Image: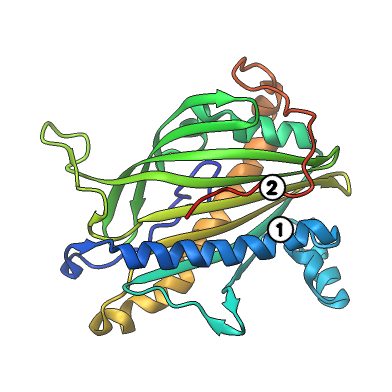
Amino acid sequence: MRRVLLAGFLAFAYPLPESAGAAELRQETTEAFNHYVRVTEARMAEGLRDGRSFLWVDSLHELQRDRRYAQLREGEIVIERLETLEIEQPIKVPDGLVHHWVALSFVPGVTLQQVLTLLQDYDHHEAIYKPDVLRARLLVADGNCFKVYLRLHQKAIITAVFNAEFDVTYFPVDQSRVYSRTYSTRIAEVEHADRLDEREKPIGKDRGFLWRLNSYWRFQEKDGGVYIQLESMALSRRVPALLAWMVNPLLKSIPREYLSRLLTSTRAALTNRSAAASFGAFPSVKQLSTQFFLVAPSSGRS
């Protein structure tokens, strides 16, 4: 059984057969993905402003919302594929695919601070998520902002290894709610990993499994535990038409499996007694700033 790709992030790089060959990330692909992100983040900001839909489930109709909450409290992982529309039309990304999903879980018997402590302890994510995270290192910590390095290992149809860096920012809303925003700043596919001839493929000129990865976590303490939500947007190469019949079913099944394992592993780490006993033992992990934000400041990304 495969375990989750990332510690602390949505992590799925979609597999394509070796015969798909090399791909190049084009400027228009990057710009289109960034536009998709901006439109999506505008929707997220609106949800924060109205105060009624902090979690995705809160935006559902009453009966469906109640059913989803019941599933979460019973220990299920709720996962849905999303697509952001603009003027009720799909947003086109030339030569690229956007993989947009949301997943939620409920962890009973823990506090918001315990959840944040675990997720911000980036140096120890390798122990929680190995072998999918081969290495993890906190590079910079400045208040509620972090820069982290992860070596990611993906094994589905084929094996892929990535050196990746991420900027992470946490935004407290109030005493019971916090959200975070994570942007990949560098993703390089590694060739011949852990061999003497190991090298990175040129960024944006690789097999196109994972070019960008944005992750948006939300945490809310209520009902005797913490609800954890992860919304993720990943960019990969477009599936060649001749391979679509084989690959497209995987695009629906693999992210669901990875997201489920990610949140399951996170919940297991939080509820493990030895892990719980170690909360607060790592000096690099600090309480979030008490400055509250109702809406995240503009990222300024283009």
Q: Amino acid at mark 1?
A: Ala
Residue neighbourhood size for the residue with mark 1, other residues' Cα within 10 Å, grouped as few (<14), some (14–19), many (≥20): some
Query: Dot 1: what SS?
Result: helix
Q: Position of residue 64 (x, y in %)?
A: 81, 75
Q: Position of residue 236 (x, y in %)?
A: 36, 63
> Which residue is located at x 52 percent, y 35 percent?
128
Q: Position of residue 91 (x, y in %)?
A: 49, 77
Q: CA distance from mark 2 to mark 1?
A: 7 Å
Q: Is residue 5 above or below residue 112?
A: below
Q: Is residue 158 above or below residue 95?
A: above
Q: Is residue 164 above or below residue 283?
A: below
Mark 2 vs 1: CB contact within 8 A = yes
Q: Amino acid at mark 2?
A: Ala
Q: Which image quarter: residue 230?
A: bottom right
> From the viewer's perspective, is 81 left or right of 187?
right
The residue where tag 2 is placed is 296
Q: Which image quarter: residue 16?
A: bottom left
Q: Is residue 173 visible?
A: yes
Q: Which image quarter: residue 265?
A: top right
Near-viewer residue (282 or 34)? 34
The residue where tag 1 is placed is 45
Q: Is residue 270 above or below residue 286?
A: below
Query: Dot 2: what SS?
Result: loop
Q: Position of residue 169 (x, y in %)?
A: 61, 39
